[in-house]
Amino acid sequence: MGQFRDRFWVSLVLAVPVVVFNHMFAELLGYTPPAFAGSGWISPVLGTVVFFYGGWPFLTGALVEARSRRPGMMLLIALAITVAFVASWATTLGAAMELDFWWELALLVVIMLLGHWLEMRALGAASGALDALAALLPDRAEKVTGTGTLEVAVSELVTDDVVLVRPGGRVPVDGQIVDGEAHLDESMITGESRAVRRAAGDTVVGGTVSTDSTLRVRVTAVGQDTALAGIQRLVADAQASSSRAQALADRAAAFLFYFALAAGVLTFAAWMVFGDTGDAVTRTVTVLVIACPHALGLAIPLVISISTERAARAGVLVKNRLALERMRTVDTVLFDKTGTLTKGAHAVTGAVATAGVDQAAMLALAAAAETDSEHPVARAIVRSAGQVSATVRDFRALPGRGVRATVDGHEVVVGGPALLAERQWTAPADVQAATGSWVDRGASVLHVVRDGQVIGAVAVEDAIRPESRDTVAALHARGVRVAMITGDAQQVADAVAAELGIDEVFAQVLPTDKDAKVSELQARGHKVAMVGDGVNDAPALARADVGIAIGAGTDVAVESAGVVLASDDPRGVVSVIALSRASYRKMWQNLVWATGYNLIAVPLAAGVLAFAGFVLSPAVGAILMSASTIVVAANAQLLRRLDLDPARVTQP
């Protein structure tokens, strides 16, 4: 990027006097250039410097393409500036031509240097944003010790250390909260603009900010093992990956190279027959100069680089550009259920109390009895009840059946159907009526027993993410089918699918067989994007047309996926589709404009309408060529206006 930037600024400074003192440009605008001793040599001398200094990357690149016999963009640019250079010197030295192209040569070099600089800058913007985050990471951290806290360098932290993060402070490394809860600003990692509530047991990512409370975090990853380091590696992979669209641009450049040469030969031959030598040379040089596809040089690379940058800023990490391009063709998105459409953690999804018992009081009794249990189901019940104030004694776990404890003097037992059968307890009819539907959809049912009487029950399930409904609806609105795959029982899968409106369900599928289901969908003619957590779903992610790994933390670096969502919000899939389709539209708009300009301007410059009295002058052709470049660059920049925020991209 540096060489293009530096050469651009130097060439721009030199190009100003080249243009101002150029007689062809002055005639075009109708002014008289300043005249003094030696003024006539300003354009040739400075133009020569611009040709060799500013044009050097294109001249050397052309040699590489010529030696490899693979003509492309560099050879086309070199052809145009070399022809302009030779013709301009011939005119300056008094040859019988009026091809004073010094101003066009200077502007051509400046524009192409600017285009390559913008492309390199946009390409580096995605990693630049992450580098900026890395620069904001604290150099020091407060390590919790047995006697208090000790300030240490972040580089000295190791796994299992505990650090203190104060309100407004940044989490220094990846870890797990062991004490406290706070709203964390994770926008630089996930693209999510709203702060997210995190509490004990939740993982946190280095670089995020605690906005309102103090946290104690146990270190789980440092250095190159952190999520930020993984994201930076993904962006680097994306920048180095191949692209079908770029290959298309290269083929178009090769076509235009041969097109320009053929047009030049035909132009020279035609004007030698129907005109004179001077006209033949003038028309041929004009054709070769304006045939250089400045716009084509920016048409696709700039769109790709901007889309990659926009994706990274939105928490969508494009590991392989080809995956982003393919996403627009996807007609079926296959979601793994657990951890993707659902939270992958137990939650209370239903509660019922028998007649005469307050439901909140029943749930509070169950939570009190489960307080000392570390089982995930127990944690879910405690969370659902909120703050519980009760005296709990004699807690005892009943392995495989439930728990028992004395709560405020009452014996409280919480357990499943096996415990009721063992104790010969019978649930009241109103409780049985409610639990029947829970069992049908595959929920785990726990009964609450007080002093030997069943007073209620709770349903515990893997809770569906609230964002999943918006995701499915948005995909349907875009004409994309939604399928789900899971190892859970059929009734569990069917219940989730019915609630979300999913089109097809694959249940009771082993992790090793998930890729076979992807193949089955592909065999039916579908273009499949597989969305999983990147752990058990690796074969399926690799098999799909596009593999999308979802999840925050260190799981973000998934080798088998082409696209990675930094957050665990499934709405990011819709963002990927929106970006892919928008990028594709911009690519083709730019490609049509860039090649269309040449297909029209070159024949006009060759003089196909000379019989009607119209001949495109070299000056006007050069201006139109520059204008086409500006249009293409401006059109690509419109991608920056695309809103990829998950909360808004899924709105109707």
Image (cartoon, rainbow, N blue to C red):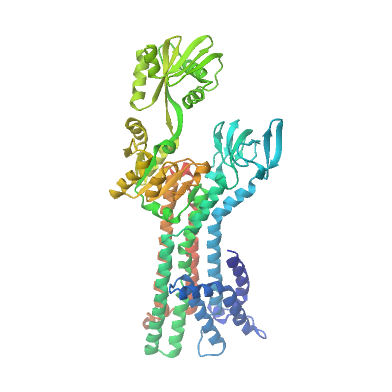
In this rendering, the answer to whether 53 lies above or below 134 is below
Viewport quadrant of the C terminus: top left
- In this view, the residue in front, 2 or 146, is 146
Q: Residue at x 59, y 31 (%)?
A: 178
- In this view, the residue in front, 476 or 626, is 476
- What is the total number of numbered labels drawn onto the structure image? 0
Left or right: 210, with 551 as reference point: right
Q: Residue at x 38, y 44 (%)?
A: 475
Which percent across, then down, holds residue 154? Answer: 66, 43
Which percent across, then down, holds residue 548? Answer: 43, 47
Left or right: 463, with 374 as reference point: left
In this rendering, the answer to whether 445 lies above or below 22 is above
Q: Residue at x 53, y 69 (%)?
A: 112
- In this view, the residue in front, 485 or 8, is 485
Seen as rendered, the residue at the extreme front is 399
Q: Residue at x 40, y 68 (%)?
A: 251
- In this view, the residue in front, 396 or 4, is 396
Which percent across, then down, holds residue 8? Answer: 59, 69
Residue 32 in sight from this viewpoint: no
Which quadrant of the structure image shows residue 511?
top left
Which quadrant of the structure image shows residue 436?
top left
Left or right: 588, with 365 as reference point: left
